């Protein structure tokens, strides 16, 4: 009996020792992250001043790769054209996870007036544009660089392995219809030799106040389809429309028909749908009805079955209107990202980590969000969890703040601390199997 007591006591001592070692390692990592915060600000400002469009992130990729190498990590570059990947192996056995940040900027001319505002110009799909980190990917890169640095400081006591994924072209391909971003990284075999048990990502979000994080179990963000509609008619003089077929009027009728379809044929009470045209191009002269018109836009859905139904109805509306007018219409649809769905079991496991990181009062349950994210490509391959990090300064109503993608999008840099701490806590707890 005494021997049993001695064994039990030894076990308690060993368990306490392990717990103490884990606590010390965790403290080491979080202390390193706090000490790195000035670097996160510096990295973010540098990236903000030097934004790069999708699949052109060469400078960004070099900055990331150089930093990861300085941490002693083996780095893969050129994954998905310009992506960067590195794996940290902890000193103890444990699960595998992937942490992802997107790197690309947008074809937006900055209007923030910041001292480090972008003045970069580039060409996007044949048009000269300004380039800006109007979505906050500069912050995402800085956050993940900081989290990587923090985890490396505690690697000897770290259970498992962490893949750091710096992804290009989240905002879409340079040419519509191409494989890009997360899908291209998967095609290049990013998970071939390293299959994570879970993948995590975050996004700074103007719709939340700084210091808070937002999450949702199940569907969070919509699927994004890029559609193009080429309407062909018959050219004629603008004063004699009856001699031709007007593709502009026909295109407008088709577009209005799709809006009636969504309002009257789709049950948007159970699954929201948004169909928007962002371009309508036709003709070169005020008094000539052209041969052709082109409409380009986006479709957002949360349910794959609803998506297929809406596309089929769109195609039928286009064909029927075109036939009635004596013209023709061709619809092409390219899926840029499936819906982002947080696995419910993983969400339940991760929420306490978010609460530990920022406080339970600052963890907000999000409504459905109709923007899209190709993080879903990773999360459709392995279980995934994605969350939002508030980026609007205190004293500004997030409901009226310039939203992500606005030329006036303004990130409160406290979001770097909130986001990096939340991501580090999520990663540490998962690896340590702390529910």
Image (cartoon, helix red, strand yellow):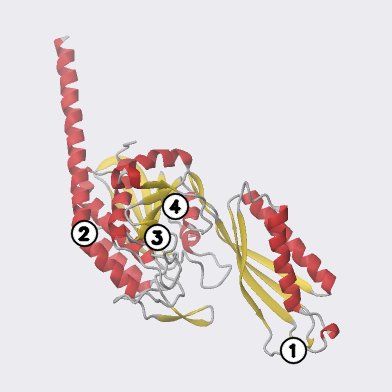
Percent coordinates x, y for residue 129 in the rendering: 47, 80
x 51%, y 54%: residue: 369
Percent coordinates x, y for residue 381 in the rendering: 49, 49
Whether pointer 4 and pointer 3 mark residues with C-beta atoms closer than 8 Å, the reply is no
Q: Earlier in the sequence, mark 3 or mark 2?
A: 2
The image quadrant that residue 164 belongs to is bottom left
Q: Quadrant of the C terminus?
A: top left
Q: Quadrant of the N terminus?
A: top left
| Distance (Cα) linking label 4 and label 2 | 32 Å
What label sits on residue 36 in the rendered view? Answer: 2
Mark 3 or 2: in front is: 3
Q: What kind of element bears circle 1?
A: strand
Q: Earlier in the sequence, mark 4 or mark 3?
A: 4
| Distance (Cα) linking label 4 and label 3 | 45 Å
Q: What kind of element bears circle 2?
A: loop
Q: Earlier in the sequence, mark 1 or mark 4?
A: 4
The residue indicated by pointer 3 is: 397
x 53%, y 78%: residue: 125
| Distance (Cα) linking label 3 and label 2 | 29 Å
> Nearest the camera: 398 or 175?
398
| Distance (Cα) linking label 3 and label 1 | 48 Å
Q: Residues within 10 Å of mark 3 (few under 14, many from 20)?
A: some
The residue indicated by pointer 4 is: 192
In the rendered image, the vertical position of residue 243 relative to residue 208, given as above or below: below
């Amino acid at each position: 009996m005494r021997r049993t007591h001695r064994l039990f006591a030894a076990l308690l001592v060993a368990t306490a020792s392990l717990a103490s070692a884990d606590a010390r390692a965790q403290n080491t990592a979080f202390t390193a992250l706090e000490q790195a915060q000035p670097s996160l600000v510096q990295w973010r400002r540098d990236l903000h001043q030097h934004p790069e469009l999708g699949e052109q992130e060469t400078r960004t990729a070099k900055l990331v790769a150089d930093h990861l190498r300085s941490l002693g990590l083996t780095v893969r570059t050129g994954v998905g054209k310009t992506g960067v990947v590195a794996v940290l192996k902890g000193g103890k056995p444990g699960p595998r996870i992937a942490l992802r940040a997107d790197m690309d900027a947008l074809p937006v001319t900055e209007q923030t007036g910041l001292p480090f505002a972008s003045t970069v110009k580039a060409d996007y799909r044949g048009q000269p544009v300004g380039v800006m980190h109007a979505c906050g990917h500069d912050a995402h890169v800085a956050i993940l660089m900081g989290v990587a640095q923090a985890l490396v400081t505690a690697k000897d006591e770290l259970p498992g392995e962490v893949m750091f994924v710096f992804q290009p072209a989240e905002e879409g391909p340079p040419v519509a219809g191409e494989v890009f971003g997360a899908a291209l990284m998967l095609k290049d075999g990013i998970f071939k030799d390293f299959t994570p048990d879970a993948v995590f990502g975050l996004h700074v979000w103007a719709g939340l106040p700084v210091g808070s994080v937002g999450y949702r179990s199940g569907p969070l963000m919509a699927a994004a389809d890029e559609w193009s509609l080429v309407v062909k008619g018959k050219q004629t003089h603008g004063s004699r429309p009856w001699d031709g077929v007007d593709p502009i009027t026909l295109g407008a009728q088709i577009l209005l028909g799709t809006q009636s379809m969504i309002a009257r044929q789709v049950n948007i009470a159970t699954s929201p749908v948004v169909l928007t045209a962002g371009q309508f191009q036709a003709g070169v002269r005020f008094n000539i009805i052209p041969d052709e018109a082109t409409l380009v836009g986006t479709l957002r859905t949360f349910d794959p079955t609803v998506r297929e139904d809406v596309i089929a109805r769109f195609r039928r509306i286009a064909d029927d209107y075109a036939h009635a007018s004596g013209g023709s219409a061709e619809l092409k649809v390219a899926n840029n990202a499936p819906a982002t769905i947080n696995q419910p079991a993983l969400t339940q496991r991760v929420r306490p980590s978010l609460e530990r990181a920022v406080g339970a009062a600052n963890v907000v349950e999000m409504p459905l969000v109709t923007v899209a994210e190709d993080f879903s490509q990773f999360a459709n391959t392995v279980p995934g969890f994605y969350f939002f990090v508030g980026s609007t300064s205190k004293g500004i109503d997030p409901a009226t703040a310039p939203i992500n993608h606005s030329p006036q999008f303004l990130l409160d840099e406290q979001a770097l601390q909130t986001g990096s701490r939340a991501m580090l806590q999520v990663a540490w707890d998962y690896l340590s199997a702390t529910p």
